[in-house]
Image (cartoon, rainbow, N blue to C red):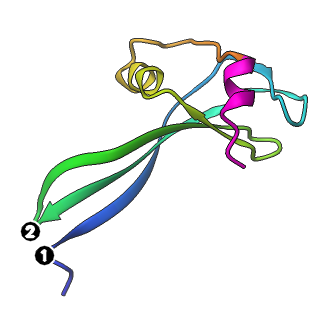
Amino acid sequence: MGKNFGEYNRLNKVGNSVPMVCPKCKNEVTFHISKAYSNLKVIFLTMGEYDINYFATCPECASVYKLPNSLGEKIENGSCEEFELNLQMLASNKLI
């Protein structure tokens, strides 16, 4: 039988960037935008999401860059259908 309560970590793809040059590999790519978050479940009810972070991943070299949550939320809600990430923002927020 499964757990009736607990904390779960999730990772969901929420969108893509317009084609742009990756600061690391210098290839022109469309970054994959993902949302990482935790949620708490009690029985079958999700009690809420927390510890939310958004990331841009290069499909060529697998470099990961943290995005501001305000931009990630716009992408996820569809209010920012096509967007161009700022290369300086990516380079300053490199994670891996």
N-terminal of the two: label 1 or label 2? Answer: 1
Residue 35 screen position, x and y as percent: 45, 41
- State the residue in front, 25 or 29: 25
User: Is residue 5 positioned above or below 40 on the image?
Assistant: below
Q: Residue at x 45, y 40 (%)?
A: 53
Horizontally, residue 78 falls left or right of residue 84, namely left
Query: Do tag 1 and tag 2 residues touch (Cβ < 8 Å)?
Result: yes
Q: Amino acid at mark 1?
A: Asn
Q: Amino acid at mark 2?
A: Ile
Under circle 2, the secondary element is: loop
Is-magenta flag for residue 16? no
Q: Which residue is mark 1?
A: 4
User: Is residue 84 positioned above or below 95 on the image?
Assistant: above
Horizontally, residue 81 falls left or right of residue 51, namely right
Give the extent of the magenta segment.
87-96
Horizontally, residue 58 falls left or right of residue 11, namely right
Farthest residue, direction front = 92
Q: Looking at the rendering, in which quadrant would you find the N terminus?
A: bottom left
User: Residue 77 appears in which quarter of the rendering?
Assistant: top left
